[in-house]
Image (tube, grey):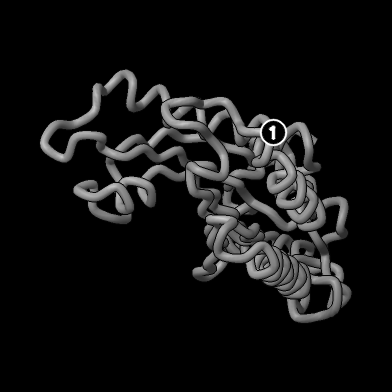
Amino acid sequence: MDTYGDMVTLLLCFFVLLYSMSTISEENWKALVMSFNPLATETLTVTPGGDGPNADADEAGGPVDLQKQIDEDIEELYQELTAFVAQAGEQSNISVTKDGGKIYISFNQVVFFDGDSPVLKEEAKPILDTVSEMLSNAAESIDEVRVLGHTAQANPKRPNNVETDRTLASQRATNVVIYVQEHSEVDPARLVSEGIGQWRPVATNDTVEGRAQNRRVEMIVSGRDLEQELQGGILQYTTE
């Protein structure tokens, strides 16, 4: 009989616990989530549909609305970049495409660097000023800005010197990131540079024109994903 009574007591405590969690306050809910992920406060939102985590996520101000706003900001950024490239014309040697939540911007080497040099050309800076301003306007919705440095295989029959190739590509990407960091409001933790070198060509290295296309700097802008952040995404690296 005692065993049965203990079981009933435990079941009662269990259901009381479930009920208390269904009506948890915003402060207690944040404390619970932070016990698992101390850096998740930026995206914790208790929606107006109720007092606890089971509230309707579709209510105004909830995660669904926040994600919708992020997606709209990234789309607006893409439209602004597209308009900028169209206004600059083909001679600008800049292209912009979009795939899902990512925007791809490609800058031809002619625009940014002299041959075999990692130093930004003066004519590249006004372009980066404009791009940095656009990135600043969407800074709260940006998950990451990844800049990739690419080179071309100078001799189609022989790969470039590995050290020279990788170093040049990395320095170019890094210098672009430095400029964006100094001229935009994007969180520096969300800025990444990579030196790819000759290994991801978009054209043949057998012709001068093809090599010119391969010598480029690419910028990949990713929009935030709130669900991923709550699961421990890049949010843990923010410096704000």
Judge left or right: residue 99 versus residue 167. right
**In-image side of 62 versus 229 (left or right):** right
Q: Is residue 123 left or right of residue 192?
A: right
Residue 46 in the image: x percent, y percent?
Answer: 82, 64
Specify the farthest residue to the top.
163
Q: In which quarter of the image is residue 6?
A: bottom right
Q: Is residue 98 above or below residue 131?
A: below
Q: Is mark 1 on a helix, strand or loop?
A: helix
The number of numbered badges drawn on the structure is: 1
Give the residue drawn at x 37%, y 47%.
212
Check disc 1 and give the amino acid type: Tyr
From the viewer's side, name the closer residue of 144 and 17.
Answer: 144
Quadrant location, the N terminus: bottom right
Q: Which residue is drawn at 80% across and 66% down?
A: 52
For label 1, the residue is 179
State the image coordinates of residue 234 (x, y, percent, origin top left).
60, 44
Judge the density around disc 1: few (<14), some (14-19), many (≥20) Cα neighbours within 10 Å: some
Q: Percent position (x, y) of residue 239?
A: 75, 33
**Quarter occupied by residue 25:** bottom right
166 or 69, nearer to the observer = 166
Residue 144 in view (yes/no): yes
Q: In which quarter of the image is residue 22?
A: bottom right
User: Is residue 207 or residue 133 the one in the foreground?
Assistant: 207
The percent position of residue 226, horizontal first and vertical second, equals 66, 60
Residue occupying image coordinates x 53% and y 61%: 95
Q: Using the image, determine if residue 25 lies above or below residue 115.
A: below
Up the image or down, 74 lies above or below 220; here it is below
Name the residue: 83% across, 51% down. Answer: 28
Figure check: 46 above or below 31: below
Whether residue 1 is visible:
no
Name the quadrant of the C terminus. top right
